[in-house]
Image (cartoon, rainbow, N blue to C red):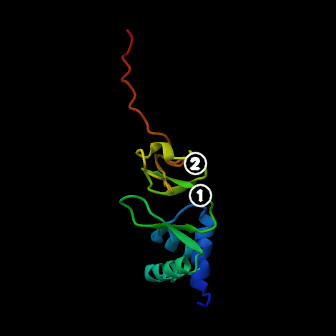
């Protein structure tokens, strides 16, 4: 059993407090509030130990490095903001995906990622039509 360290506690707390999957860089920035001298190498080492202990789970998105979240989440999906690149939990699920599989195939699980703009980045703005002055 690994001993608990101040660094690991800060990393665990950062992930728990975020309430969303964090990249290692985001974990580093959040955990440095409690442990200012924390390095990225220490974050990676502790993320591995926390995963091995079953306390956190990786969140893999296509073309992205893994992010990490607390393991106590029930089945859920994710939303990635195309502007700030942050990832958020989506706790609703469209349900059984078996009807989408080819005939004769058996669905044993699924992952769904939505992409768009988070509430901080706002909706996509459409260019306004030029106003023609009236004479």
Q: Which residue is mark 2?
A: 93
Q: Is residue 63 left or right of residue 115?
A: left
Quadrant where the image shows the N terminus: bottom right
Q: Which residue is mark 1?
A: 75
Q: Residue at x 37, y 8 (%)?
A: 135
| Residue 11 to residue 83: above or below | below
* Whether residue 30 is visible: no
Q: Is residue 1 left or right of residue 61?
A: right
Q: Residue at x 58, y 48 (%)?
A: 93
| Residue 29 to residue 128: above or below | below
Q: Residue at x 51, y 83 (%)?
A: 37
Q: Position of residue 28 (x, y in %)?
A: 50, 74
- Asked whether 39 or 50 is in front, the reply is 50
Contact between labelled residues 2 and 1, with CB atoms less than 8 Å apart: yes
**Considering the numbered disc 1 on the image, is that residue within a helix, a strand or a loop?**
loop
- Residue furthest toward the top? 135
Q: Residues within 10 Å of mark 1 (few under 14, many from 20)?
A: few
Q: Mark 1 to mark 2: distance in Å? A: 8 Å
- Asked whether 2 or 87 is in front, the reply is 2
User: Which disc is residue 56 wearing?
Assistant: none
Q: Position of residue 79 (x, y in %)?
A: 50, 51
Q: Residue at x 48, y 53 (%)?
A: 107
* Whether residue 86 is visible: yes
């Amino acid at each position: 059993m690994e001993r608990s360290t101040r660094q690991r506690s800060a990393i665990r707390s950062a992930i728990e407090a975020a309430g969303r999957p964090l990249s290692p860089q985001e974990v580093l920035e959040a955990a440095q509030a409690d442990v200012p001298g924390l390095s990225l190498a220490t974050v990676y080492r502790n993320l591995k130990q926390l995963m091995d202990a079953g306390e956190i789970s990786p969140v893999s998105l296509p073309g992205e490095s893994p992010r990490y979240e607390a393991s106590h989440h029930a089945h859920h999906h994710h939303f990635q903001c195309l502007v700030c690149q942050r990832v958020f939990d989506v706790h609703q699920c469209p349900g059984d995906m078996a009807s989408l599989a080819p005939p004769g195939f058996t669905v044993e699980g699924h992952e769904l990622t939505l992409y768009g703009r988070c509430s901080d980045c706002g909706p996509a703005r459409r260019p306004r039509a030029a106003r023609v002055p009236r004479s």
